[in-house]
Amino acid sequence: MPKLDSLINVFKQFLDMQIKRLDLKLGFRCNNNCLSCPQAHRRHLGDLSTAQVKRLLEEGRLHGANEVVLTGGEPTVRPDILEIVSYAKNLGYDFIQLQTNGRMLYYKDFCEKLVKAGVTEFSPAIHGPNAKVHDYLVQSPHAFEQAVQGIKNLKELGQYIIMNSVINKINYAMLPETAELFVNLNVDQYQFAFIHCVGNAKKNIDLLLPRKSDVMPYVHKALDIGIDAGIKVMVEAYPFCFMRGYEKYCSELYMPPSEIMDAEGVVENFDKLRKESGKLKGPQCKRCRFDPICEGPWKEYPEKFGWSEFKPVPGPKVKSMEDLGVEKS
């Protein structure tokens, strides 16, 4: 990883923009080897040191940030994770989200320690409705059992849980069953994210990348299950032309600007990066009423399948969340 001073200098440039939430990537080590992992090709970079993490948390507070998302890799495999969470809390971060594959949450005493240290929200990931599917996708036996028990542990502790699940060719027909699992586990929110074919997912693109038009009815049904249960639901990287009647559930409408610790230690404005270099718009998109607010798909999708599935939606242009009847929070 790069020297701390160079990290700090770049970090300050983006904190000066007064973005209040830090997305702090602690490193790239992980106890899974997910077929769809977008970070797998960076594992050789290792993790930030405890001192580096603390310094970056300090810089965030000095520049007004009061929210932090701790991500990886897998943060819970770090022996210093409790120390990091506690340090963030003592610095004054009043929102601390932990993104995790959920396996270490199997141990209830560890969950209790995370809560006591200061985690205010947990975001675990399960990618299918059963062990056969999930364990295969994450390439780790017993991962499903461990994550499910972890969620039960957190609910017993009264914690807020946002589930994440990556949509791919293997699991998309089971999205409704996965949604039912999340409802039965009494989670507070769940989000399905269409696969981003970089890292391991790029190597496995033929195995994992489905056509959005094939996936669409299963996404809608999976959303309906959560909506009917009164749970907050979202879909990421699924353009509006596939979401007719479900437009307000596109997560891009709600993503706050944030800065991210990159693999090379550079903190980037991910909102800008995602829109300008991560995703693409097709030639027909300008005729769609959602063009002003839609980001398009991850660029790897049309590079493989082209633009034939993307059908412009007619009507007056939608320029804001309010045009969809969605109030800004």
Image: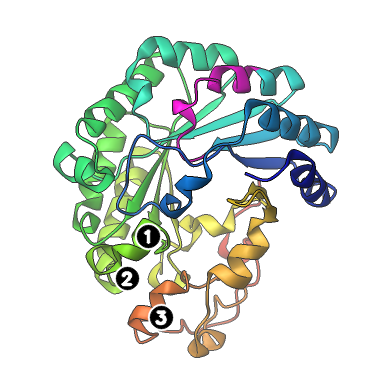
Q: Mark 3–mark 2 contact, CB under 8 Å?
A: no
* Residue range highlighted in magenta: 72-86
Badge 2 element: helix
Residue 170 inside the magenta-drawn segment = no
Secondary structure, magenta segment, majority class:
helix
Numbered circle sitting on residue 212: 2
* Residue at the spot 61% in from the left edge and 36% down from the top edge: 48
Residue 104 image position (x, y, % from top left): 37, 23
For label 1, the residue is 195
Q: Mark 1–mark 2 contact, CB under 8 Å?
A: no
For label 3, the residue is 303
Counting the numbered discs, the total is 3
Q: Looking at the picture, does residue 91 appear above or below residue 212? A: above
Residue 293 seen: no
Q: Looking at the picture, does residue 304 appear above or below residue 83? A: below
Whether residue 94 sits left or right of residue 186 in the image: it is: right
**What residue type is disc 2 on?**
Lys
**What residue type is disc 1 on?**
Ile
Tell me the mark number nearer the camera, choosing from 1 and 2: 1
**Mark 2 or mark 3, which is nearer the start of the sequence?**
2
| Foreground residue among 99 and 213 | 99
Residue 287 image position (x, y, % from top left): 53, 88
Badge 3 element: helix
Q: Quadrant of the N terminus?
A: top right
How many neighbours does mark 2 have within 10 angstroms: few (below 14), some (14-19), or many (20 or more)? many
**What residue type is disc 3 on?**
Glu
Residue 49 seen: yes
Residue 40 image position (x, y, % from top left): 41, 51
* Residue at the spot 48% in from the left edge and 59% down from the top edge: 250
**Mark 3 or mark 1, which is nearer the start of the sequence?**
1
How many neighbours does mark 1 have within 10 angstroms: few (below 14), some (14-19), or many (20 or more)? many
